[in-house]
Image (cartoon, grey):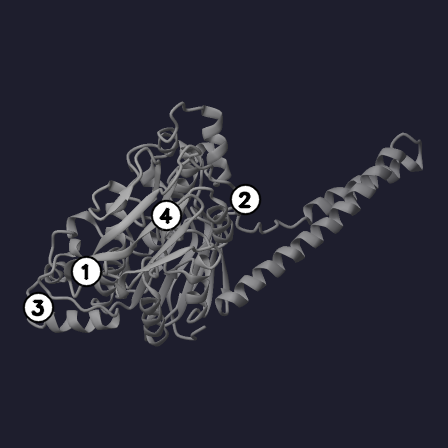
Amino acid sequence: MSQENVIISFDKVNFAYNPNKPILEEASFSVRQNSKITIMGQNGAGKSTIFKLITKEIKPESGQANVSLGSTIAIATQVMKPENLEKTIEEFFAQLFDKKMYDLPKRIAEVLDIVHLTAPLDKKIKQFSGGQQARLLLAYALIQKPDILLLDEPTNNLDTAGIDHLTAFLMAYPKTCLVISHDANFLNAFTDGVLYLDSFTQKVEQYVGDYYNVLGEIEARIERERAKNAQLRRSIQDRKDKVNFFANKGGKMRALASKLRDQIEEAEENMVDERQEDKTINDFTIPSQPEIIGPMVEIKSVGVMIESVPVHKAISPAITVRKKQRLLIKGPNGIGKSTLLHALASGTEEGAIITPDVRVGYYRQDFSGLDFDKTAYQALEEMMPNPWNQEIYATGAQFLLSSQILKNKVGSLSEGQKGLLCYARFVLQKPGLLIMDEPTNHINFRHLPIIAKALDDFEGAIILVSHVPEFVEQIKIDQVLDLETL
């Protein structure tokens, strides 16, 4: 880690949104100038809360969250705010400055080049794809030239070229950078330290080293703690057995039993708090709609964007997707993949027909299909024709959504929890067709092999867009539609 001065420090910070569920308890750590730090932890552990404390959006209940005096901060958020969608690129960036910046077009061009995006200044934000909006959000942070750059899941919605470009930029970035991400390969390329939020102790642990080395160190520590406690438990049980035997004897034997009790108490005090690994969801099955026979989907033509101009392209021969078949849709950011999936799911794509009565499960990359004002319980309940309380709670628990979490509004969940909520909804919905737009977005990497297996085993049909090749490789793909080569 850099030996520069400390630029961020937390000293015994306590914070909770809910008095019964603390997020941070006496969290302490420091970040030195010009270092590149990863914040990792289970979904809902409080990673985004750390960012809010740094930016002063929220304040600690006690303790100190300090940022070096005069340091500027910029954050690249995960999702574009709705009020920005009608703005042009120039209006979007201009709102950062108190006065008119005559060199603003030049500044915009420089940061768009950094994020590998070309676009006219008068183009509206809503006309950009999810991946392109992610690049604009990053550029929005970069144009401020902050001393501290905060990135929240910056690789979500980016294609491979975009991730490579971002990685190269961060490796050369001359100032402090804190990143929340579940993309292990991306993080390992530039991280020189990790802050780990332990959702069980609500503490923050600080490690030095690249991402994979830190993961190895954490796992080794867990094993050491488990081994020490196992040894102490055996010793305690052995002494308890002797106490039970000697306590019924008289004289010296009873005195020995008293001494053994003291040793048991001491050994129990020496038990260490085991760092628990991130909980991982168990294997699960998405039941499929059984009664559909024949093609689920037929695609004869699709709309794509060619140099920002919408064009309709014929597909010959037409693509049909049946039960147990998987169609992968490929193409660079901005070509129209998400637009196509949305049109398919909503039935507005002229050149594609979904067989009537097919139930469609739709994973949207921005979770806009969820009603953020409903509780998570209601979001599950609405997927069942005959809601059954016990099944709803059991399904939520399968995806680490406890009964307490299910009482919360969807909008208050972490992005990772929203993703898991979508999978829980599919289990209850029993769809015939899954339309998946970046289904790994925001999901803890430990869950991904389990999700990939569930999708691979799904008896219905799947139409998939994903920029994560390691994930796609775990799912048997039957057909590929490359929008760039139509």
Element class at badge 4 = strand
Mark 3 and mark 4 lie on one chain; the one further toward the N terminus is: 3
Q: In whole angstroms, how far apart are the C-alphas of marks 1 and 4? A: 24 Å
Q: Is residue 77 visible?
A: no
Q: Residues within 10 Å of mark 3 (few under 14, many from 20)?
A: few
Compute the Cα span from label 3 to label 1: 32 Å
Residue 322 picture location, percent across and down: 39, 45
The x, y position of residue 456, in whole percent, is 48, 49
The amino acid marked with disc number 4 is Val
Question: What SS does tag 2 mark?
Answer: loop
Amino acid type, callout 2: Asp
Query: Which comes sooner in the sequence, label 1 or label 2?
Result: 2
Q: CA distance from mark 4 to mark 2?
A: 26 Å
Residue type for callout 1: Met
- The quarter of the image holding the C terminus is bottom left
Label 3 sits on residue: 101
Give the mark toward the camera: 3 or 1. 1
Q: Which label was assigned to residue 321? A: 4
The residue at which mark 2 appears reads as 283
Amino acid tagged 3: Met
The mark nearer the N terminus, 3 or 2, is 3
Nearer to us in this view, 33 or 260: 33
Q: Provide the residue designation for mark 1.
A: 305
**Would residue 283 be found to the left or right of residue 295 on screen?**
right
Q: Residue furthest front?
A: 317
The x and y percentages for residue 201 are: 52, 47
Quadrant of the rendered structure where residue 429 is? Answer: top left
Foreground label between 1 and 2 = 1
Q: Residues within 10 Å of mark 2 (few under 14, many from 20)?
A: few
Q: Residue at x 31, y 48 (%)?
A: 58
Q: Quadrant of the N terminus?
A: bottom left
Mark 1 neighbour class, 10 Å CA radius: few under 14, some 14 to 19, many 20 or more = some
